[in-house]
Image (spheres, grey):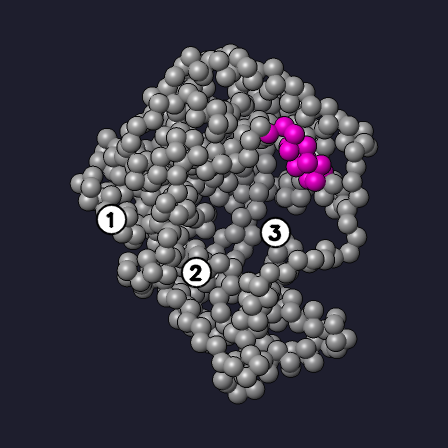
């Protein structure tokens, strides 16, 4: 840029040794860090459970509740595993209020109205939630659950103790589970109980006000202006322009995170016991399900003869009674299934060597809520699992299916499969990066056309020249690459519309 060369080396995270990775992600934490290795030696174990939250925080991080540092938080489980785990603690009262707002104000086909609903809901939550989402240690999160369980049926099911409240009823020691002061727990609940009822009443009142046309806020017209620019964003734009092949989409960060976590503490099977057969819906039940889904895009898209792309149940078979609300429920979600191939000449030419298996496309597949829930629960059990590491076939192979009830799931088998799919996950990351690149180029070309009032061919010529100069190839090859990226960008845009 401006006649000066920039030497940028994209780190090969997959092939780095621990010392190089520690230098790249200095002050961060992971199974590769000297602090973690020292703690393993201190507690005389080679088994480690280190989750994403631990990996994503500084080595000097301290819990805001118990004020212990990481070396004070770690402890060895009964199975001899060193637990290095933090939890994201949030107010479940907000979850309940948000669902209430959505039930009273269902979304429609009108885009602006749906945006207004989202803005109003999140604005309302600022006055309902008692605390912001906070990262706390595993023991503070664990003792908070024990405190609520000890209060029994007297407590509001969606109530959550705040980090400051947790700090008042724990007795913390280094490298041990907290002790619980039940007298302090009861005192806090008695004090905040009226406030919880008041906040839920406020949430319902605001939801009904919005449903009655009040407290509306007009959506901004046009494109949001960037009124603030920082040095990093400006420099990054220049780097991205000079080096179009540089990875985007946080792929380097994701690879570092994958190298950082460890899940030796995956427990015993979470497979539930056999359940009684589900009750099939009667005509009135089916009418209710159709009514609550009439505005849902994917339910409408799926015809009467639809079957789940994973468990193969019909619309009637996926209907079941919710364990929480005791009402009939059925939902259809869209997920991606991958197509593997090694015979696409263009993909092989432009993307060769980027993954062990070449992913050239994906198919949007409509699945039922229970199949989608399997992946969600697997991630809750093991936050080191990326949902993209599981194919539809992986999920289907770990479930026992019956009509009108949740699946019987072999979670351990599915978790093992997710951890085994390292090659798949690398290929997915590469595919996502390619998708981001193609959409990025297409967006820049459209922007260039708008600013300079030129045709797509003229815009393509400009970016083809930039690409050829940046990677030192002939202009003809630059044109071929840009034509392919434009075609790919349009293909991804069409596919996104179907999702």
| Residue situated in front as seen by the camera: 207 or 110 | 207
The quadrant of the rendering that contains the N terminus is bottom right
In this view, the residue in front, 425 or 303, is 425
Q: Is residue 302 magenta?
A: no
Residue 444 in view: yes
Q: Residue at x 24, y 48 (%)?
A: 37
Rounded to the nearest whole Å, what is the CA distance between mark 2 and mark 3? 26 Å
| Precedes in sequence: disc 2 or disc 3 | 2
Vertical comparison of 491 with 401: above or below: below
Which marked residue is nearer to the observer: mark 2 or mark 3? 2
SS of the residue under disc 1: helix
Q: Is residue 78 above or below residue 21?
A: above
Residue 89 vertical placement versus 144 (above, below):
below
Q: Residue furthest right?
A: 213
- Which numbered mark, 2 or 1, is in the foreground of this view? 1
Q: Which mark is residue 37?
A: 1
Q: Quadrant of residue 490?
A: bottom right
Q: Which residues are magenta?
A: 117-129
**Image position of 397 (left or right of 81):** right
Residue 252: assigned label: 2
Label ID, residue 184: none
The residue shown at (35%, 49%) is 29
The Cα–Cα distance between marks 1 and 3, rounded to whole angstroms, is: 44 Å
Write down the residue under mark 3: 499
Q: Quadrant of residue 113?
A: top right
Q: Main secondary structure of the magenta part?
A: helix
Residue at 39% across, 43% down: 61
Q: Is residue 428 left or right of residue 284?
A: left
Crowd band around label 2 with a 10 angstrom C-alpha radius: few (<14), some (14–19), many (20+): some
Q: Residue 13 in the image: state x and y as whole percent.
A: 36, 62
Q: Measured from the top left, where is residue 462 in percent x and y?
A: 64, 80
């Amino acid at each position: 840029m401006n006649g000066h060369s920039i030497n940028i080396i994209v780190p090969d995270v997959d092939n780095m040794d621990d010392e190089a990775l520690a230098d790249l992600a200095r002050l961060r934490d992971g199974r590769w860090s000297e602090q973690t290795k020292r703690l393993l030696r201190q507690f005389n174990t080679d088994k480690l459970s280190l989750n994403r939250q631990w990996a994503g925080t500084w080595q000097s991080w301290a819990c805001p509740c118990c004020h212990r540092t990481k070396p004070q938080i770690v402890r060895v489980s009964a199975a001899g595993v060193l637990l290095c785990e933090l939890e994201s603690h949030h107010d479940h009262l907000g979850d309940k209020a948000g669902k209430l707002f959505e039930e009273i104000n269902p979304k429609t086909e009108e885009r602006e109205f749906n945006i207004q609903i989202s803005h109003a809901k999140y604005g309302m939550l600022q006055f309902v939630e008692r605390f912001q989402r906070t990262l706390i240690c595993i023991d503070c999160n664990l003792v908070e659950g024990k405190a609520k369980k000890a209060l029994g049926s007297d407590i509001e099911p969606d109530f959550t103790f705040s980090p400051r409240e947790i700090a008042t009823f724990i007795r913390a020691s280094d490298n041990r589970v907290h002790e619980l002061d039940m007298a302090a727990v009861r005192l806090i609940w008695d004090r905040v109980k009226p406030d919880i009822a008041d906040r839920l009443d406020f949430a319902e009142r605001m939801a009904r006000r919005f449903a009655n046309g009040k407290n509306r806020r007009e959506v901004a017209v046009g494109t949001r202006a960037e009124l603030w620019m920082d040095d990093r964003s400006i420099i990054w734009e220049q780097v991205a322009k000079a080096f179009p092949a540089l990875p985007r989409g946080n792929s380097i960060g994701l690879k570092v995170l994958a190298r950082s976590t460890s899940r030796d503490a995956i427990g015993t099977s979470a497979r539930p016991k056999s359940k009684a057969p589900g009750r099939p819906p009667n005509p009135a039940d089916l009418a209710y399900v159709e009514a609550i889904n009439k505005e849902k895009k994917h339910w409408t898209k799926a015809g009467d003869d639809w079957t789940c792309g994973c468990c193969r149940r019909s619309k009637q078979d996926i209907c079941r009674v919710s364990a929480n609300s005791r009402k009939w429920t059925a939902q259809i979600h869209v997920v991606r299934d991958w197509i593997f191939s090694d015979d696409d000449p263009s993909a092989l030419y432009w993307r060769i060597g980027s993954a062990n298996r070449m992913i050239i496309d994906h198919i949007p597949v409509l699945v039922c809520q229970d199949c989608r829930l399997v992946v969600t629960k697997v991630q809750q059990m093991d936050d080191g699992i990326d949902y993209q590491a599981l194919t539809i076939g992986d999920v289907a192979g770990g479930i026992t299916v019956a009509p009108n009830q949740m699946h019987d799931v072999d979670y351990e088998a599915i978790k093992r499969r997710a951890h085994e799919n390292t090659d798949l996950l690398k290929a997915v990351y590469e595919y996502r990066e390619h998708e981001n690149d193609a959409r990025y180029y297409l967006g820049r070309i459209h922007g260039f056309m708008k600013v300079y009032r030129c045709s797509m061919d003229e815009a393509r010529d400009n970016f083809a020249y930039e690409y050829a100069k940046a990677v030192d190839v002939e202009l003809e090859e630059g044109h071929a690459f840009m034509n392919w990226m434009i075609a790919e960008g349009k293909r991804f845009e069409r596919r996104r519309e179907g999702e």
